[in-house]
Amino acid sequence: MNINNIKKLTTGIIKKNEPMSAHTTFRTGGPADLYIVPRNTKETAALIRYFKLNKLPYFVIGNGSNLLVSDKGYRGAVIDLGRNDGTEFTLLGYEWQGDKFIADVGAGCFLSAVGNIAAGAGAAGFEELTGIPGCIGGACIMNAGAYGREMKDVVESVEIIDRDGNIRKLTKDEIEFRYRGSSLMDDGCIVCRAEIGLSKGNTEDIKAKCEELFNKRKESQPLEYPSAGSTFKRPEGYFAGKLISDAGLKGYRVGGAEVSEKHAGFVINKDHATSEDIYKLIQDVKARILDKDGVELEPEVRFLGEF
């Protein structure tokens, strides 16, 4: 890749051989050939067009919370929209429009930040999503959810970059959301910002609910260890965590990776795990559940690089 050409397209950060362990919540992963932090949507779109035109591999990340990068790294460019150091991909503004609270949120903004702002403003409807460890861009694409609420319930519109590098705006009616997926994912879109719509509520009640759900997560999930959150999608008619627990796999380890003893739906980096450890453990769990229950578990985690 010609770095001089790329420097013409962005005023942001450009690094060679950047370890992806610094940019994923599993805290594993080898170096990407190139690591880029564009400063705004226009620069991002220009980069996408450049990579497409020159048939160069690239991958876009936010918080890296649903991603396992190979120990061998990635032979391409990683474009990071999750850095909140002066880029456009932060919380851009919010206001009340009548009885509706509208937040203009950049792709790299943490869901927790949106939830905290909403709670302080007395805006209800984001409490269940506040504790999800991710950014708005990825959350929209995968229709992230928890405790019965999903992103589809709060998204008003999104600004995206399509496969060809064009910047477009889509309303919620133009997006097909489904369980842990969407037409945004199918169409290879990059979400750069979103409008979030919430309703009026009582600030103290909202904060109390957020605190209650946080404590619930803390008690039931292994938040003290690096992970990607729930490792598997919920199979129809089942719960992945229960299937794994019933199979006696709680505490099952491969190297430094472990099926959490606190919540079997989580694969954690227990003790300096490698990406290969985590990948092998995931495959072992899938094989065991398929053999025992005839259910094929589908990972929520995306895999990048050579495994």
Image: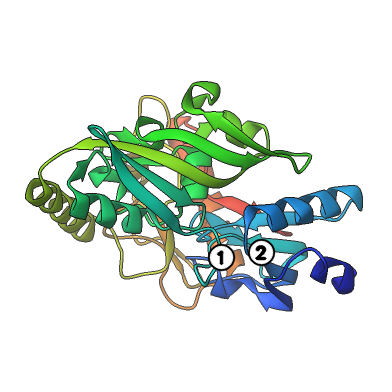
Q: Answer with mark 2 or mark 1, whichever residue precedes in sequence.
A: 2
Could you tell me residue 182's position as x and y percent?
54, 31
Q: Residue at x 49, y 78 (%)?
A: 272
Quadrant of image for the N terminus = bottom right
Q: Position of residue 239 (x, y in %)?
A: 34, 36
- Identify the amino acid type marked 1: Thr
- Please name the residue that numbered disc 1 is placed on: 87
Q: Please tell me which residue is depicted at 14% across the width and 39% down the height of the picture.
A: 201
Residue underneath mark 2: 38
Q: Residue farthest to the top?
A: 173
Find residue 129 and name its label. none
Quarter assignment of residue 225:
bottom left
SS type, badge 1:
loop
Quadrant in the picture for residue 39: bottom right
Q: Residue at x 31, y 70 (%)?
A: 224
Q: Amino acid at mark 2?
A: Pro
Q: Position of residue 223 (x, y in %)?
A: 31, 64
Circles 2 and 1, Cβ within 8 Å, touching? The answer is: yes
Q: Is residue 291 visible?
A: no
In the displayed structure, 84 sits above or below 197; it is: below
Badge 2 local density, few (<14 within 10 Å), some, or many (20+)?
A: many
Percent coordinates x, y for residue 240 in the rendering: 38, 40
Q: How many marks?
A: 2
Above/below status of 220 relative to 177:
below
Front residue of 121 and 29: 121
What colour-coding does the image apply? rainbow
